[in-house]
Amino acid sequence: MKKLKLWLLYGLLIQSTLVGMMATAHAASDDDYNFSWLDPDKKIYVLQNRKFRKAGGAMVFLMGGVALSETYRNTYQFQPRLATWFNEEFGLEAFYTGRFNSENNAYKALIQASGGGTTPLIREINSQFGILLNWAPWYAKINVFDTVMYFDWYFSIGAGSMSSEIGPKTKADSPSLWKSENLFAFYLGTGQIFHVSDLFKVRLDVLGHFYSAPVFGGLAGAPSDKSIFSGFTFSLGIGLKL
């Protein structure tokens, strides 16, 4: 009887040892993925180091895009930019914009419906120049087709000038009725800079301009009322860090 009790005791000890070893092995293989053992009141934060930096050199970009808010014109533009960053958050940027305007379908439909009698005053922006202060609060990385892409998300505010013309119909039809205007403008924008490498960059940008101008362009005999006008452009470009 005593021998039976001893063998039972030995069996229980062996069984307890085996169960403990299996639990330890399972925990070891599962700890990489299961964090339930952590105190739920505590949080883990992972600080990501920057792989690509903007500060320490100028950046040159060549952008091209379209206007998003022209009522009677199809507008395309090219826009070279020169940027410098004081640190990874703040930088300055200068840009020049050349624009190409042509009649869109809304203008053609209006002319056709009115038999050519109704022609709205149209302001065409031919060029822009401005200085932007850029603020990049977010730096992150995403997986794009199994490739890790690093990017900065920035916001822009600035000021500059616009060279424009206003008149009815088209300049080819009635050049004497068109008037040139140089206007002061404020700029607001946002976009992303994707770091393909230390040297090569790809960029998306949305930039809005806001300006005050005479409603009727200051044409002879027209009221002198002024209003605030705005417009936005979407651009895509490539750049190099010098």
Image (spheres, grey):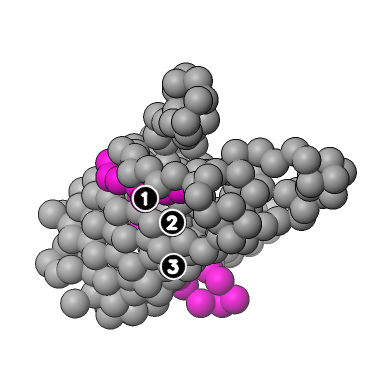
Give the amino acid type for the residue marked by disc 1 in the picture: Ser
Query: What residue is shown at x 70% (from left), y 56% (from top)?
Result: 104
Contact, mark 2 vs mark 3 (Cβ under 8 Å) = no
Instruction: Give how far across and how far down residue 29 sits, in percent.
Output: 53, 67
Contact, mark 1 vs mark 2 (Cβ under 8 Å) = yes
Give the amino acid type for the residue marked by disc 3 in the picture: Phe
Give the amino acid type for the residue marked by disc 2 in the picture: Asn
N-terminal label among 1 and 2: 2
Q: Check residue 75 in the rendering and tell me which mark sits there, or answer none.
A: none
> Number of marks in the image?
3
Label 1, secondary structure: give it: strand
For label 3, the crowd category at 10 Å Cα-Cα, with few meaning under 14, some 14 to 19 and many 20 or more, is some
> Between residues 46 and 210, which one lies in front from this camera angle?
210
Query: What residue is shown at x 13% (from left), y 54% (from top)?
Result: 86
Give the label, 3 or 1, closer to the camera.
1
N-terminal label among 2 and 3: 3
Instruction: Give how far across and how far down residue 145 sits, in percent.
Output: 59, 76
The residue singled out by tag 3 in the image is 78
- Residue 134 visible in image: no
**Marks 2 and 3, Cα distance to the nearest angstrom?**
11 Å
Instruction: Give how far across and how far down residue 187 sits, in percent.
Output: 36, 41
- Residue 108 visible in image: yes
The residue singled out by tag 2 in the image is 126
Question: Magenta span covers which residues?
Answer: 142-165
Secondary structure mostly seen in magenta is strand
Q: Check residue 163 in the rendering and tell me which mark sits there, or answer none.
A: 1
Q: Is residue 144 above or below residue 172?
A: below
Query: What residue is shown at x 47% (from left), y 33% (from top)?
Result: 219
Instruction: Give how far across and how far down residue 204 sits, in percent.
Output: 47, 61
